[in-house]
Image (spheres, rainbow, N blue to C red):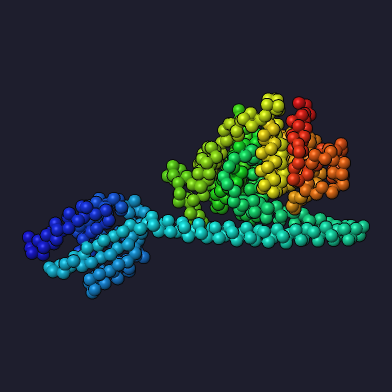
């Protein structure tokens, strides 16, 4: 054994106790041989290599080609200055690219130069920083989108008002091609308002909580938000909701977020497919409601299927996504007691299924007073109101009287619910935007014959002139500007106004009941 080898072995033995105790990655590196001659268990745990494997692996094989120039510069600094520090990327044994920060010191010059390399694995810290930056960008984007949506809503309101004014001014001259063009403009404004309304509702922050909601309305609104995207990607979209679909108990915003994630992923999975079909369907069997989102895309590779709901798991090319969508969808589903599963194959695409199991909500018997007969406790009332405080107060009051409530924050959403479900009564605020409560009531009468009550804050309106003085005006046929409503509730509610409306709806019998 020559003196050089003897000296190096003595150095290695000197550091053995330090290496054994350290939780950081430590190694001794030979500048002459350009290889690791000693490392500790922490290095093997972090990178996956056994100690002997790491010793015998050439340094150039541990680093990506782009990192080699940085590594060479670090070695040059060690030879000339005796110290170097840099951040590098290194391959683990599994092939994962890890981020490390190394500080190296020359601790022996003769008989051969040996370096002590102290390495920190900063992969998770970097990922957390990237996630924080990305989250901040998304938050900023969300706030900006909400502000833009607000400004667009104001502009569209002005356009709608002026279109109505123009229609009134033209009067009898509004015929033929001019009428057709004006009608297209009105429908175009309505379409833009629906998109803006969906963005505002999606961006609106609410405390997580359940309520009875309509899957059909959620899917319709989600597809409305994505309509421009699916059309630009030439995706054929079909949606089928079972006619007997019950209301589900969940957080509406959470469910819509899950549907948007699944639909967007489905579109991106089909970008290289000849057949591009997005199919969304919902059904019910033995009180179990299911919603499926299916595509004709490339499918999920078998090796990714076990981890598809984990953060950063993705089948998309770099730059298309971070792999966070399905992880978030799974968390939101679990928060709402929803089972989220999938099936996938290379020839059949992928189908995600959301399962909503009974009970679909809290027992109404817990809230119903003794005077409410048990046979009426499942009566459902649709409340169409865009003021959150009024919506909450009306819902709570009706639920205390044994009525189940379903909420809609726009006339558009209210009509969606009426088309897809059967309800026993409707309460609608007069001052909705962009479609007023009177317009909603008129449209609702085409598809619904049960009780409709308007909510108004104006005590001087002619339709309320003959009211009984308890905040509730009964009508017997067309009212509120020739709209057929059952009655009018005045804000703020006084006396037993809501009680009278609740009693009427509890006593309402549907055709055939």
Vertical order, 367 against 65 (above or below) = above
Q: Is residue 318 left or right of residue 416?
A: left
Residue at the spot 27% in from the left edge and 56% down from the top edge: 24
Q: Nearer the viewer, residue 76 or 18?
A: 18
Residue at the spot 20% in from the left edge and 52% down from the top edge: 20
Residue at the spot 75% in from the left edge and 53% down from the top edge: 434
Give x and y (percent) for residue 176: 88, 57
Where does the N terminus fall, quadrant-wise? bottom left
Give x and y (percent) for residue 345: 50, 41
Give x and y (percent) for residue 263: 58, 47
Question: Could one spot residue 106 in this view of the protein?
Answer: yes
Where does the C terminus fall, quadrant-wise? top right
Residue at the spot 87% in from the left edge and 36% down from the top edge: 476
Vertical order, 235 against 504 (above or below) = below
Question: Could one spot residue 234 in this view of the protein?
Answer: no
Image quadrant assignment for residue 208? top right
Vertical order, 128 against 511 (above or below) = below
Q: Nearer the viewer, residue 274 or 55?
A: 55
């Amino acid at each position: 054994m020559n003196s050089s080898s003897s000296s190096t072995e003595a150095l290695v033995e000197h550091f053995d106790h330090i290496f054994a105790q350290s939780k950081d990655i430590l190694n001794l590196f030979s500048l002459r041989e350009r290889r690791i001659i000693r490392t500790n268990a922490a290095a093997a745990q972090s990178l996956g290599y056994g100690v002997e494997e790491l010793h015998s692996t050439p340094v150039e094989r541990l680093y990506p080609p782009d990192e080699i120039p940085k590594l060479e510069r670090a070695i040059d600094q060690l030879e000339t200055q005796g110290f170097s520090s840099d951040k590098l990327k290194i391959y683990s044994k599994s092939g994962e690219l890890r981020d490390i920060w190394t500080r190296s010191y020359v601790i022996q010059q003769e008989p051969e130069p040996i370096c002590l390399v102290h390495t920190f694995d900063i992969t998770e810290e970097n990922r957390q920083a990237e996630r924080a930056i990305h989250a901040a960008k998304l938050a900023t984007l969300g706030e900006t989108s909400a502000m833009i949506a607000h400004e667009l809503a104001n502009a569209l309101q002005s356009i709608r008002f002026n279109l109505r004014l123009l229609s009134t001014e033209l009067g009898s001259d509004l015929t033929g091609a001019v009428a057709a063009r004006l009608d297209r403009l009105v429908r175009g404004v309505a379409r833009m308002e629906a998109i803006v309304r969906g963005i505002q509702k999606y961006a609106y922050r609410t405390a997580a909580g359940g309520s009875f909601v309509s899957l059909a309305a959620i899917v319709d609104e989600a597809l409305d938000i994505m309509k421009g995207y699916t059309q630009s990607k030439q995706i054929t979209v079909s949606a089928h909701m079972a006619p007997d679909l019950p209301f589900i108990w969940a957080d509406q915003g959470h469910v819509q977020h899950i549907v948007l994630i699944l639909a967007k992923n489905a579109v991106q999975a089909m970008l290289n497919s000849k057949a591009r079909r997005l199919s969304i369907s919902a059904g019910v069997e033995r009180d179990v409601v299911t919603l499926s989102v299916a595509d004709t895309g490339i499918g999920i590779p078998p090796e990714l299927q076990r981890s598809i709901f984990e953060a950063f798991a993705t089948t998309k090319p770099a730059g298309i996504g971070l792999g966070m969508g399905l992880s978030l969808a799974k968390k939101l589903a679990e928060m709402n007691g929803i089972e989220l599963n999938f099936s996938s194959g290379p020839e059949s695409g992928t189908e995600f299924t959301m399962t909503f199991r009974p009970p679909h909500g809290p027992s109404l018997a817990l809230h119903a007073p003794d005077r409410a007969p048990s046979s009426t406790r499942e009566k459902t009332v649709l409340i169409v109101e865009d003021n959150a405080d009024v919506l909450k107060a009306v819902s709570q009051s009706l639920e205390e009287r044994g009525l189940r409530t379903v909420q809609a924050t726009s006339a558009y959403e209210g009509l969606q619910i009426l088309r897809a479900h059967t309800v026993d009564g409707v309460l609608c605020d007069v001052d909705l935007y962009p479609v007023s409560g009177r317009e909603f009531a008129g449209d609702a009468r085409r598809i619904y014959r049960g009780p409709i009550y308007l909510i108004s804050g104006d005590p001087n309106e002619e339709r309320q002139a003959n009211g009984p003085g308890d905040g509730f005006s009964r009508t017997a046929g067309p009212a509120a500007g020739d709209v057929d409503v059952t009655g009018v509730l005045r804000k703020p509610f006084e006396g037993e106004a809501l009680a009278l409306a609740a009693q009427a709806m509890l006593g309402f019998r549907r055709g055939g009941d």
